[in-house]
Image (cartoon, rainbow, N blue to C red):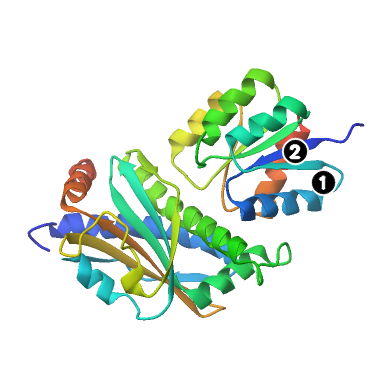
């Protein structure tokens, strides 16, 4: 990792993602009507296949969104399927009952992913003064091995992943936001950090 | 006073239902129309009078901003709210160019009230 990112770059990246996840957690707090605690972002340089293996071995619900423009990345919001139902129920509350409507549940969790991932990506773009476009989110459910399989990366690709764990205090539901970048995007990200590092050096 | 009509344009069914439910709590007398995208919204406008617009930014086909540009050709003065999960300032700046109010998702009772006031001060 030290060859890829200097200590200062890594520190700054963690701070940027901290700001981003703060916005995303605030959005989830509004949606789920409860306090959200978040972990310090963890940055790893690993094989894509190892990343998949590191996910919880259970049925998961994953909203995936690709970003392009000044930064190409894949971001994902991951909950257990059970947890995702609870979040949707809390989001819609008295307004809409999704208990017997799978299509509406999927639509709702996709929209929650859209809101949270955009909040995070948008705040990073603001901090770096760059423009990041996002595609429409898509939803994948199932065990980890089935997930992310249709995405850009091969199993033996080396990736930079940024993992942030969230915890909904009242409902005791855990979720994870993941950002995955290939080497080219990492270099672009490092370029974006340069002006900030220059300012603070 | 004539009954006002709000057209809600969002590709997410859940969002449309939620937006309608939240507005209906404070404006139960309004008519609410829904469209899942820009083309459907423009089709509705050909046959139905609409007073206010709630338009999502990130949609397949026409984006929210592209739709607003089209709507402005026939509804130059109508109050429009652009709803977006994307908090980048460029979106807000472009929204202002079309004289529409940019509101960030997720919606709260406060932001719905803000949108309702924008509509009511036409």
In front of the other: label 2 or label 1? Answer: 2
Res. A130 image quadrant? top left
Q: Residue at image x 50%, y 29%?
A: B94
The residue sitting at 57% across, 78% down in the picture is A170
For the residue labelled by badge 2, is the local secondary structure a helix, a strand or a loop?
Answer: strand
Q: Which disc is residue B6 wearing? A: 2
- Image height check: is A89 above or below A158? below
Residue in the foreground of this view, choosing between A72 and B91 = A72
Number of the label disc, if any, that sits on residue B27: 1
Q: Chain of mark 2?
A: B
Disc with the residue nearer the chain's start (2 vs 1): 2
Horizontal arrangement in the rendering, residue B53 relative to residue A190 (left or right): right
How far from the left and from the top, in percent, is residue A51?
Answer: 25, 70
The residue most toward the left is A3
Is residue B9 in sight in this rendering?
Answer: yes
User: Which class describes the residues within 10 Å of circle 1: few (<14), some (14-19), or many (20+)?
Assistant: few
The residue at 64%/66% (across/down) is: A101
Measured from the top left, where is residue A144 in percent x and y? 34, 73
Residue drawn at 44 percent across, 34 percent down? B90
């Amino acid at each position: 990792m030290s060859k890829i990112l200097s200590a200062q770059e890594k520190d700054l990246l963690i701070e940027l993602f901290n700001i981003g996840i703060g916005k995303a957690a605030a959005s989830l707090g509004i949606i789920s009507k409860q306090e959200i605690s978040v972990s310090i972002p963890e940055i790893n340089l690993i094989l894509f296949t190892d990343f998949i293996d590191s996910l919880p071995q259970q049925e998961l619900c994953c909203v995936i969104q690709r970003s392009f423009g000044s930064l190409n990345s894949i971001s994902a919001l991951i909950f257990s399927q059970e947890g995702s139902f609870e979040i949707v129920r809390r989001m819609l509350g008295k307004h809409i009952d999704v208990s017997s409507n799978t299509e509406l549940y999927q639509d709702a969790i996709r929209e929650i992913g859209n809101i949270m991932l955009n909040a995070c990506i948008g705040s990073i773009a603001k901090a770096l003064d760059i423009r990041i476009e996002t595609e429409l989110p898509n939803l994948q459910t199932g065990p980890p091995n089935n997930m992310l399989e249709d995405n850009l990366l091969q199993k033996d690709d080396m990736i930079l992943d940024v993992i942030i764990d969230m915890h909904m205090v009242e409902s005791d539901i855990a979720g994870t936001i993941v950002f995955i970048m290939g080497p080219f995007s990492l270099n672009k990200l490092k370029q974006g950090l340069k002006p900030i590092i220059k300012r603070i050096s | 006073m004539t009954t006002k009509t709000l057209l809600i344009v969002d590709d997410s069914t859940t969002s449309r239902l939620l937006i309608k439910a939240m507005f209906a709590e404070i404006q139960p007398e309004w008519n609410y129309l829904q469209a899942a995208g820009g083309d459907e919204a423009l089709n509705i406008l050909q046959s139905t009078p609409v007073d206010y617009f709630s338009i999502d930014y990130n949609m397949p086909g026409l984006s929210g901003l592209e739709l607003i540009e089209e709507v402005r050709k026939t509804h130059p003065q109508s109050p429009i709210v652009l709803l977006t999960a994307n908090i980048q300032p460029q979106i807000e700046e472009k929204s202002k160019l079309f004289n529409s109010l940019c509101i960030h998702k997720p919606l709260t009772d406060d932001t719905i009230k803000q949108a309702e006031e924008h509509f009511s001060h036409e």
